[in-house]
Image (cartoon, rainbow, N blue to C red):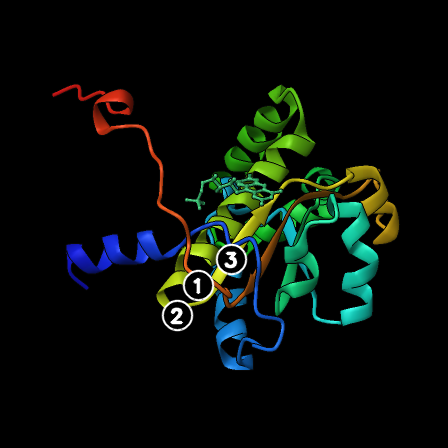
Amino acid sequence: MNHEKILEILHFRHACKQFDPTKIIPKESMGTLLEVARLSPSSFGMEPWRFIVVTNPSYKNELQPLCWNQPQITSCSHLVIFVAKHHSVQDSSYYERLFARRGLAKEALTQYLKRYKSYISSLPSIQEWCEKQCYIAATNMMSFGAILKIDSCPIEGFQKEQLQEKLKLDTTKESVALVVAFGYKVQDPTQKHRLSREDIITWID
Ligand SMILES: Cc1cc2nc3c(=O)[nH]c(=O)nc-3n(C[C@H](O)[C@H](O)[C@H](O)COP(=O)(O)O)c2cc1C
């Protein structure tokens, strides 16, 4: 893939406001995008996420009022809800299992666990730490979706408590980080607006 192609893909991706409800993402493409999410990087490799994929039209209808009545919720092909598992990352049986996968020597593992526990106890909010990482998986899905010519819209416009209740989440353990709608646009996006490179990039050479 050359540089022009990368820029073309980045310009293809936009926050799609209206999807064509008759166009459904092929199973294989959605499977690949969910692999993209699963293979995304996470701090300490904790994979503090799970993904709820909604295709059921009546369930989407029920979710829409909880998401500022945004049309993307019902018109998209697949709605992915990124759930942060903030309880799991504090549960020793979970994080010890994940660290054990690395096959580290006993001493290295002990050191690693010590560092991890000290790190998470220093965080102002473990829930936010987990939610931030869900954004990485979501971003990857949107970017790779664009390669497959799949449109998307990241959605933070939802009533968190009501949505969590609807999804029957135990909020002492999990929270909704964000929602992303995937599908195919009905019309071409409007022009992209971005700050200039000079505005946002500082080089220290
Ligand atoms: C975290 C996040 C939350 C967003 N929430 C919404 C939303 O609820 N509804 C919506 O229509 N767009 C939403 N957007 C889309 C942004 O408005 C959009 O990405 C931005 O204006 C830039 O436009 P572009 O993505 O088309 O380049 C969200 C974007 C991000 C990154």
**Which residue is most to the left?**
205
Q: What element carries label 2?
A: loop
Residue position marked by numbered label 3 in the rendering = 152
**Which numbered disc flags the more N-terminal residue, 3 or 1?**
1
CA gap between label 2 and label 1 equals 5 Å
Identity of the residue drawn at 40% across and 68% down = 149
Q: Nearer the viewer, mark 3 or mark 1?
A: 3
Estimate the x, y position of residue 136 in percent, counting from the top left: 49, 45
What amino acid is found at the position of numbered circle 3 in the picture?
Answer: Ser
Identify the residue shown where x is 76% and y is 72%.
56
Badge 2: few (under 14), some or many (20 or more) residues near its Cα, within 10 Å? some
Q: How far apart are marks 3 and 1 (CA)?
A: 8 Å
In this rendering, is residue 203 above or below 94? Answer: above
Report the front residue among 86 and 190. Answer: 190
Point out which mark residue 145 bears. Answer: 1
What amino acid is at disc 1? Gly
Report crowding for label 1: few under 14, some 14 to 19, many 20 or more residues within 10 A (C-alpha): many
